[in-house]
Amino acid sequence: MNIIVCLKQTFDTEERVLIEDGRVKEDGVRFVINPYDEYAVEEAIRIKEAHEGQVTVVSVGPTRFEEAIRTALAMGVDEAVLADDPALFGDEFTVAKVLAAIIRQRPYDLILAGNQAVDDGSGQVSVRLAEELGIPHISMVTKVEVEGNQVTVQRDAEGDIEVVSGSWPLVITAQQGLNEPRYPSLIGIRKAGKKPLTHVTLQDLGLSAEELAARTEVREIYLPKPKQGGRMLSGELTNVVKELAEALHSVEKVI
């Protein structure tokens, strides 16, 4: 069985986000595997251990992504591919195109990814990837069972559980609760440095800048306004209701 895992490196969720000159400041920030992608890595390794096979991580991003990739390799992933050519960077449309081009160059049965990235939270890349490859997609998965080429999953459906079955090739996105990712062992960390990590460029993938051009544009990045303390209303009920309605209309502008 050949399993592909799509991985992104993101800010540690406990890091403080700072905006400088309209961009998120990255100096001195700790980066980690996107937590949802970490569930996907762990699940891919578990499936490999149960059914044998090969797990390959693919990623699109700057060279610093190597740190997250090496962590995945130390966890038990077999090899990795990193598209760190700036010509391959862009929005979700671009990333899905690049991932599809990488994946088409190798055999695959299952593709796992995180349900979303904690930095942008768009949840678009995996859906777009499935469309690019012309294969089914199941999102927000909290349990995976593999029997032969059949895959049965449980998915989070607005607080309920939905059971879905399909056969590979198939894209699955991991939701929180799917598993508990392992910590890399000392032996795993030592082996990770010897596992293959391939870097690919625009030319390697046979793509053109025109077909990868982003379909969206970020106009502004800003932090939310600081929260203020609540306001207590007191007095006769009729007056309180009137005052609340006026505040919601003229101050909060929600009605």
Image (cartoon, rainbow, N blue to C red):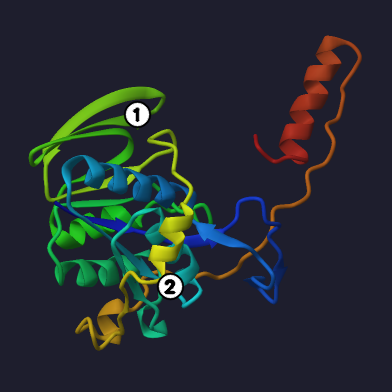
The foreground one among 5 and 52 is: 52
Is residue 114 visible in the rendered structure shown here? no
Is residue 60 visible in the rendered structure shown here? yes
Looking at the image, tell me whether mark 1 or mark 2 is earlier in sequence order: 2
At mark 2, the secondary structure is loop
Query: Residue at image x 35%, y 73%?
Result: 82
Badge 2 local density, few (<14 within 10 Å), some, or many (20+)?
some
Query: Where residue 183 sits: x, y (%)?
Result: 48, 48
Q: Which residue lies furthest to the bottom in this view?
A: 203
Relative to residue 170, is residue 124 drawn left or right? Answer: right
Query: Residue at image x 25%, y 86%?
Result: 208
> Mark 1 — residue?
157
Badge 1 local density, few (<14 within 10 Å), some, or many (20+)?
few
Relative to residue 209, is residue 8 drawn left or right? Answer: right
Image quarter for residue 28? bottom right
Q: What residue type is labelled 2?
A: Gly
> Mark 2 — residue?
61
Query: Residue at image x 23%, y 26%?
Result: 163
At mark 1, the secondary structure is strand
Q: Residue furthest right?
A: 235
